[in-house]
Amino acid sequence: MTTCHGVVNLPEVRKVAIFGGTHGNEMSGVTLVNLWINNGAEIQRSGLTIKPFITNPQAVEKCTRYIDTDLNRAFTQDNLSVPRSEELPYEVRRAQEINQMFGPKGSPEAYDVIFDLHNTTSNMGCTLILESSKDHFNLQMVNYIKRAVAPASCTVLLTEHPLLQYSTTRSVGKHPIGLEVGPQPQGVLRSNIFESMRAIVKHALDFIELFNGGMEFQPCTVDVYRVSEKMDYPRDTNGNITAMVHPNLQDCDWEPLNRGDPMFQTFDGRTIEYEGGHTVYPAFINEAAYYEKHQAFTLTRRESLTANGIKASEM
Ligand SMILES: CC(=O)N[C@@H](CC(=O)O)C(=O)O
Ligand SMILES: [Zn+2]
């Protein structure tokens, strides 16, 4: 329902989850969530149930990304509906459990908001990951967070794409939101990365509390970077990598890449240039977890999205 000045009434948020350890070697989320499981005072907000939860405990135990398969790709309808069996990969069984606890995905009983905490080895700083350009609640939330952290920056990555979108752990919730902070090596805790992540979760929960308290959020625009393409490393016929990310591109996540700019450097010192026609903004540059996914970086395009004004409905 839109009122005369473009403000949409949305249901109050009641159930919020904070996921850590979807990848067991991304230590900021694992550590924060374990901290909050032991003492939740910091994440309590009036009138809200907030559940901190370790999504892949076996991978956390082994400090590895996953046991059998990537949990953050496992929430497909096929996986969620296949009959339960001990033969299934661990993460598929775990996805079914998580779907029961926090979903079911797409149902009215699902959690309202799910934050999923990740780290990247790339120099991406703080990145909020959205899955839909039409989720006005999430757009308002990221707008609030961006303003709250300014002048520090917080970039928004939009993964909505007909072919490249994947079935995330957080997607069992109605408003899924990923938080990706880097650079941080796998298995390592860095205090600056840990504290940035903690601050963003705090702002996000503040937003939800204000929303539930009846605050009206005015229509706004949000600059986002929409995934457009995956770029693999150059490889030989055996599938072995023949070049590295070029030094001019390394650590330059979110900076414009234009036709003719260096992309890769071969082992014999030759430069491979970007040949695309549009200005793109690379992210996840040289992410450690993506070598096995045949991905050197993600290309994105800049876009400005418009969010409706929102207000919690009095029901
Ligand atoms: C480095 C890393 O794990 N990134 C996440 C991004 C996301 O949560 O959408 C992933 O590939 O699942
Ligand atoms: Zn991750």
Image (tube, helix red, strand yellow):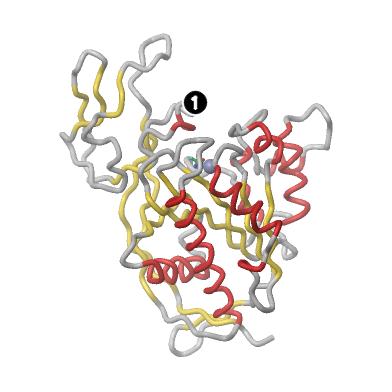
Is residue 249 in sight in this rendering? yes
Q: Is mark 1 within 8 Å of ligand 1?
A: no
Is residue 159 in sight in this rendering? no
Q: Position of residue 136 (x, y in %)?
A: 49, 69
For the N terminus, give its image quadrant.
bottom right
Q: Position of residue 74 (x, y in %)?
A: 64, 39
For the C terminus, give its image quadrant.
bottom right
Q: Residue furthest left?
A: 260
Q: How many other residues sit within 10 Å of disc 1, few (<14), some (14-19) or many (≥20)?
A: few
Q: Residue furthest bottom?
A: 4
In the image, residue 84 above or below residue 315:
above
Taking the spot 57% from the left edge, 49% from the top edge, the residue there is 29
Residue 118 in the figure: left or right of residue 98: left
In the image, residue 198 above or below residue 70:
below
77 or 158, nearer to the observer: 158
Q: Residue furthest top?
A: 238
Taking the spot 40% from the left edge, 43% from the top edge, the residue there is 183
In the image, residue 130 above or below residue 290:
below
Residue type at numbered disc 1: Glu
Q: Position of residue 50 (x, y in %)?
A: 68, 65
Taking the spot 59% from the left edge, 40% from the top edge, the residue there is 23
* Residue beneath disc 1: 292
